[in-house]
Amino acid sequence: MQMENDRVCRRVLRFEVAVNDLADHKRRLLEANQVRTELTLPLESAVEPLRAARITSLSNDELYNLRIDDDFCDAINPRNEAAALAMLLGKLGSQPQDLQLLDKFYKAYADQASPGSGVCYCTEGGHKENALYRWAASSGIETRLQPAMFDGGIRGLAAPTDLPAGSETIRVPQAVLISHETAKSSDLGPVLMQFPQLGDDSIAVVWTMVERHDADSPRAPFWKSLPEQLHSGLSMSDSLLQTLQGTPAYAEIDTSRKHVEQQYRDIKPILEALVAAYPAYMQPEWFTWPAYLWAVQLWYAYAMQVRWPDGSSQECLVPYASLLNHAPYPHIIQYGQLDPDTRVLSFPSFRPTSKDQQCFLSYGPLPNLKLLLFYGIAISHNPHDTVPLQLQIPHSNSVRQAELHDMLARHNIPLQHKLCAGRLPVSLLQAASLLGDSKAGLQDSIARCQELQLLKRLEPMLKSVYTFVSGQAHIVDCAVQQLAQDTHGC
């Protein structure tokens, strides 16, 4: 999308569909909904450009969950709305009359977010966050946010003053970023690179296990600011893990824990060799299983994917910005690109941040299973939670089975689906219609009345499948209730 000036100096908003596997689908949606991709400013309303932004910002998962009759006049989900608002903000720039059009959409978005309360700033006294704040300033990090504690003992970053949409909340120079290249270029790097068993990720982990204990390290305030213990699915106790027995979370967490344990066993001889080679410096307690697990969790939970100007990407620890917490309704969503001219990693907010409000970023549209596994958190009523559903072709005569296989393949209807909050996707209902009726043929669309009938028929089965998934049964009720409202009087 780009802004152009025509011969009469009119400003034109242009929405371009990125060239990828989703492009044709998005173009069909734009055409079917009569959404224009060129709009002349000033505008009387932001609804029309937002419809275009919502469609062009759709992800693969969001396309899957769309209803045929969605008109994009309302938000699709938090991720898509954030991307659409950020797109419009980048286009509109700083024109006050244009930005005012987004006010009601900012408010609607913010009303869905948790307001937070009980801010207590940590920029004075002996707080380790205060030491990090001062070190960040001396290291060239610029910020309009300050470290603070919030209700429940949660630490994060807050805005000491009102910040408008588009504010650069944090700017981190490339030299401050910590990556596997940082580890390789350290004094320890050449030693670690002599071991072919150590890949880039393992070199970064082992270097972290040593570096965090170096009082003379230029990054010492950052290491000291980190929690002494990190909690995630990887460090979950056996007894706690057993409470998840029978859920998808149990299988994924158990598999991931065993993988990390095996990695430690594989490199333990190297760690013992380091202690033997440098007994005056390396301490055995730096290389225990808990120390290794801490370093692994640090890189899983704190590292951000950063794209370099040459197009390459690296996982990086980003000091100070690491205090930003995740939320499904964030303030910051675009933060992974180093500026090729300034060599600075910027964290711009796409919506306003009120005074004393915690400023959030997004790790992505992650379900609670991923948040629990890698970050040790779960969000009540997470809008990105999904429940997997695997349909099977019923055992019947071979001719009918072949027909079903052919129809599903020709119309690209999968058997593996995801149930999320709201109405069920068309492809799931089409698949259910085919598999549940021996005489059914594929319909190009399913009216909402038909959808409700199908869903009510499927409701007992769906609930029986998901009763073991804690907190997920409400999704089926939500879908039924929403459809009942939509089809009232149908």
Image (cartoon, grey):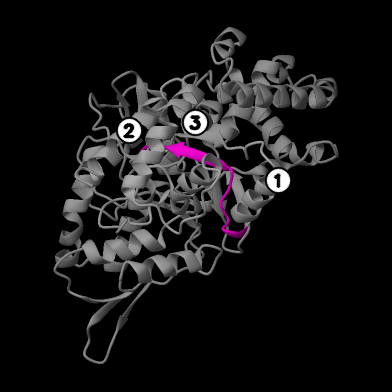
Magenta stretch containing residue 199, yes or no? no
Toward which corner of the image does residue 353 lie, by quadrant? top left
* Cα distance between the residues tagged 1 and 3: 32 Å
Magenta stretch containing residue 417, yes or no? yes
Question: Which badge, 3 or 2, comes first in the chain's sequence?
Answer: 3
Q: Is residue 405 above or below residue 293?
A: below
Where residue 15 sits: x, y (%)? 37, 71
Report the residue marked by disc 3: 371
Q: Looking at the picture, which amino acid does disc 1 mark?
A: Ser
Q: Looking at the picture, which amino acid does disc 2 mark?
A: Cys
Q: Looking at the picture, which amino acid does disc 3 mark?
A: Leu
- Count neighbours of disc 3 (C-alpha within 10 A) and say few if under 14, some if 14 to 19, many if 20 or more: some
Mark 3 lies on a secondary structure that is helix
Q: Which residues are magenta?
A: 410-422
Where residue 137 sits: x, y (%)? 40, 42
- Count neighbours of disc 1 (C-alpha within 10 A) and say few if under 14, some if 14 to 19, many if 20 or more: few
Q: Report the residue that reaches farthest toward the bottom.
A: 7
Report the residue marked by disc 1: 185
